[in-house]
Amino acid sequence: MSESKEFVENSVVHAKIPLISFVRLNNCSLSKSHILNQVLNNSEQQHDFFCHREMIGGSASRLISNGMVEICWNLPSGNQSIDVFPEAVAIANLRGDASTFETQFRFLTKVSAALFVFLDSADENEQRLLASLRGIKPEIFLVVNSQRNMNQTVKSSIETVIDALQVERDHIILKSQKVNLAAFAKMINSSIKTVLSGSQESLSIDSMKKTAQELGLAIDEIQSKACVSAEASAEKVMKTIGVHPVTDYKKTQLPLQGENWKRLAKIEKEMCRLKNSGEMSLEKYKVQLQQEKDEIWNKQSQYKMTSTMEIFIDTLLMSDDTERAFFLKWMGLKLDMQSRKHISNLRRKYKDYDQKKDKASIAKLDQELLNCSLGIEHYMREMGQLYESASFGSNKISDKILNLPKLAAKMLLAGSPLELLDGDASNIPEKWVSDVLMELHRMVGQKSRLLVLTVLGVQSTGKSTLLNTMFGVQFAVGSGRCTRGAYMIFLPVDNDLKEELLCDFVLLIDTEGLKSPALAQLQDSYEHDNELATFVIGLSDVTIINIAMENSTEMKDVLQIAVHAFLRMKEVGKKTVCHFVHQNVGGVSAYNKNLTERKQLMDQLNEMTMIAAEMEKKPNIKKFKDVLDYDVEKNNWYIPGLWHGTPPMAPVNTGYSVAVLDFKKTLLGVLKARKDEELSQIPEFLQWISSLWKAVKFENFIFSFRNTLVAQAYDNLCKEFSDWEWSFRRCIQSLLTTEIVQISNSDTSGNAEAVELLEKKAYKEVSLQTNAINAKLKEYYKKKDRHVYLVEKYKTDFANSIKGLENEMKAEVQKRLAAALEMRGNKKKLADIHRKQTAIIECQVLQLLQNFKHRRDEVSDEELTAEFEKMWKREMANITGLKEVDVPADILKQLRESFGNRKVMEDLQKIQDLTKYGQGEFQVKEQHITLKNKFHSFFTQRSAKQELENIANGIIKFCSQTIKQHAQEKCDYQSTFTKDVLVEIDEQLQKERSKINMAFELDLNLHICGIASRKFREMQKKFLIEQNPIKHLQKFKSKYLSDFIDLYREKDQCHRKAQDFTQLCLKPAVAEYIDKSLGPDIVDAVLLNNPSEYSSRVLFQYKIQKELMEKPNFDDFKSTSYNTMLMSKIGYTIKLLNAFPTTYLCQI
């Protein structure tokens, strides 16, 4: 702890900590090590820091330990009741007689703050040795065993030593028979505290090297050439950092893993999810994203290798295995020291911001904490990025870059971890990882069967420590985390175990801690953690879920999302074996006592799995173990805490190691017992990584939620909101239809003013509907059921959606009314042309009559026709046509939006032309048939296929009627027509939900929408032909020409005019009126003549079921499921209307 009572983290080698040394002369009757243990232990915990003769096995003869100096550190916790010393102190213990090992003794006198000498007596040599200490720096304390039978010679020798050293009386500690061991240890403790309270000068262990060299002591780091060379290379790398801030250093020296790499990760996910296309067409948006991606890769490939990376890579390439290992170790130590300085300062700032509740500054500081982290993994990540970027484009790759995968593979075989998933960018450098692992595959002779084992858990629950303890590996451990992502270590399997485990390597994957309080401030914290958990669980053969009792809720949330994601991913094919390790649970009866908790956990996971399965339309999934292989009785482990007592001075709990060993033995036993599973080799594992990561990138819905309940609550609100939105749109659509008719029938004068009034009326209705939806949203959030409180954070998003819908509807009103006004204007132009044409014709006739008054010959029809053509061409030039809408593209866009929260984005992106779908009979495919459907069809694929064909044909026939009705309307295509069709498809599918899966639902939607795209496009073309002014005039051109000629010839036109008026005006108006009113009249007629059958739904269903029982025809019974018979029955009844009296039919 520092003077300001703050905890300080530092390297024990470089920290300046006072050293207190303990030595003995000759065979002292006091056990120095035993007493030291008493001094260092507090009242709450006892631990043997030093071996001594009073402990079990302590009486064995020493062979090599004499002359060795042991050291331990006592660190304060800040709790005065348990702290032995108020500040950090180092304790050195020299084994054996100090006079025999004078070099070690001299070393301790030069580096210690105090020297405690244990003695019973002192001969001449010992007196001379001690006398030489007079005037040296450390304080000398004599620890004497004062016995009742001590002779005068012994007393005299001790007095001689005291006089020679001029030791003060308070520096003499006597152990009399009246003083017990505890009291004696307290006396020594008080003397040490006295030393610590003085102004002694402390040395670091690193600074002691010079003293050791002067005395001729060997130093390993200096004697080993490989170690010296490696340290020099590491120091070269560190010099490139200098005094620059770590964030600036990473931007200049490690640039490839910066913002461009993170942006690439976001682009790749957006290319899969397509969330932000806006008004841009999907194809254009994908092209834009691909262009941006190529530009970034091009920028990445232009970077030259920095000086830092030159040194780092050259050292790794040119070193042998030993020097490479030393280099990596030195780099790790030096980088830890470098990062520690910056992180300590940032944590102090964090504490200040936390006290001020400054959330914005805290979030910014959290990101800064992540950015200032610097470790070996960043250099290895940059090495991978160098390889990735060099592989882009056609530039020649240097030999140095080409050798990087082989270098990384060697490091993997040597036990170094390799980053699988970059947590900072949430992305995988797929080519780098693939080439490294394939190089390793070649190195081991293509014998690389992998057993993949992953540990997953909330931050600071001991995940890495668990793997390190189980398998003896060295994943990074520490208080809190700075790096993010997933790392893997390849653990070779001994030859005698290969046949039992059926694998060549155990691949250990260690992940960052989930649910980090620091990362919770960041925007993508849920998404990042859920993606990571889903990915690593999906990769694993065995997943260890590490749970501490205090954060089990967070881990359950992550598991729910992972299970939900697996249900949405068709790529997931294997079931991962899950083991739950409950940390910090002590006691021999922990397993039995926690039976209730285990059952409760299982019930919760089962419930959430069923909710997720219901949301994803997978009724065959009922339990958690249907997705992940988990046995509630066998796959739960309770492990006591790692520390026995209160850290930092708590010893390691042996119960922890025993429990972990039991878990490991059982786990290996289970793995040995499975003989029917064939493990994948590296090539298959890489394919699995690629497909699983692709599935994660395409997942655009579930990862952003905390757990399945939140996702379900959000989905429920989305469904409610969709109904409100459709009601809103239908209301405005109905109003617009009425107003457009008014505009079409209005007088030509004052149209702009009339449209303005209609527009204001429509805007008012839009505002009323907006207020209504807002009120419904408020009422929805007042509900106590359906877990509404879980989606409180999304309330603003839905409010914004309402505002967006309001703006969209206002724009639609303005657009539609303007179009109607334009159409009316075009009709006015048509009438004006007609009047102008008549006037011109009359003028021409009069002129011709005048010109040929005295001539007997007459003007020919050809001349009249030529004059008419000139006028026609001149007038046609002033009229513009109508624009076409891309109907199939609009339908596809709505279809994609309707599947927005489902796992079909990848399939929808592949569709180029929707009109090619639905051209033949709907084909039921193998992937459409669920296991449940096969089972209930007596295990025969044919009957299951027939059942789905019947469902599909019924829905297609039903929806085709809706498409036909819309297509027969004499109007332009409207997006609401497609919405009607999609709603009907969904309503029909809901009735068959237990029999269908997502693949069937998607293909059926595509089939029906393909039909709709062709019908609606044809409808639009007909409308343009009928209503386009130019084409309309062309249609009546011959009539106008005939009128012109007849007028000149003075023919009688009355009969022909009457025929034209009847065919062109009366007939269409009467037909349109009958078409609009016939439906309700037919319903009235049916109800009037068949009240017993059609007066209510119950009576109608009763009549149908009665007929089915009377007719022994199973096909009729089966057809009721698809509305076929119901529609036939109604159609037959309508045909009976032909028998009605003619007068009644005329009334209709």
Image: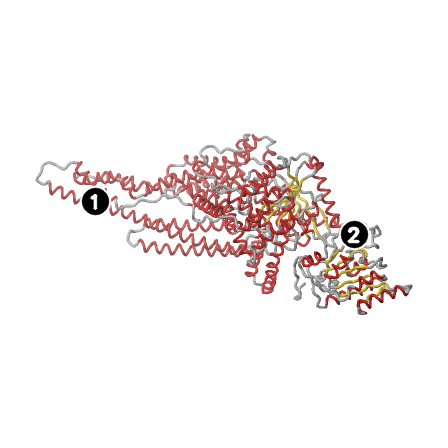
Q: In the picture shown, does residue 540 fall above or below 921?
A: below
829 displayed left or right of 55: left
Give neighbour class at mark 2: few <14, some 14-19, many 20+ (Cα, 10 Å).
Answer: few
Q: Residue at x 17, y 39 (%)?
A: 864
> Which amino acid does the dot numbered 1 rest on?
Thr
**What residue does disc 2 label?**
65
Q: Position of residue 654 (x, y in %)?
A: 76, 51
Camera-side residue: 960 or 529? 529
What is the image's colouring?
Answer: secondary structure
153 displayed left or right of 95: right
Camera-side residue: 500 or 504? 504
> Which amino acid does the dot numbered 2 rest on?
Ser
Q: Which mark is residue 895?
A: none
**What residue does disc 1 label?**
838
Q: Position of residue 190 (x, y in %)?
A: 78, 66
Q: Quadrant of the N terminus?
A: bottom right
381 displayed left or right of 1007: right
Judging from the image, what secondary structure is the residue with disc 1 in? helix
Residue with the most extreme left position: 854
- The image quarter containing residue 494 is top right
Q: Position of residue 225 (x, y in %)?
A: 65, 48
Q: CA distance from mark 2 to mark 1?
A: 126 Å
Q: Quadrant of the C terminus?
A: top left
Which one is earlier in the sequence, the residue at label 2 or at label 1? Answer: 2
Judging from the image, what secondary structure is the residue with disc 2 in? loop
Task: Tell me if residue 784 can be seen.
Answer: yes
Task: Tell me if residue 556 can be seen.
Answer: no
Camera-side residue: 195 or 534? 195
Q: Are marks 2 and 1 in contact (CB under 8 Å)?
A: no
Q: In the picture shown, does residue 866 fall above or below 202?
A: above
Q: Tell which tag, 2 or 1, sits nearer the viewer.
A: 2
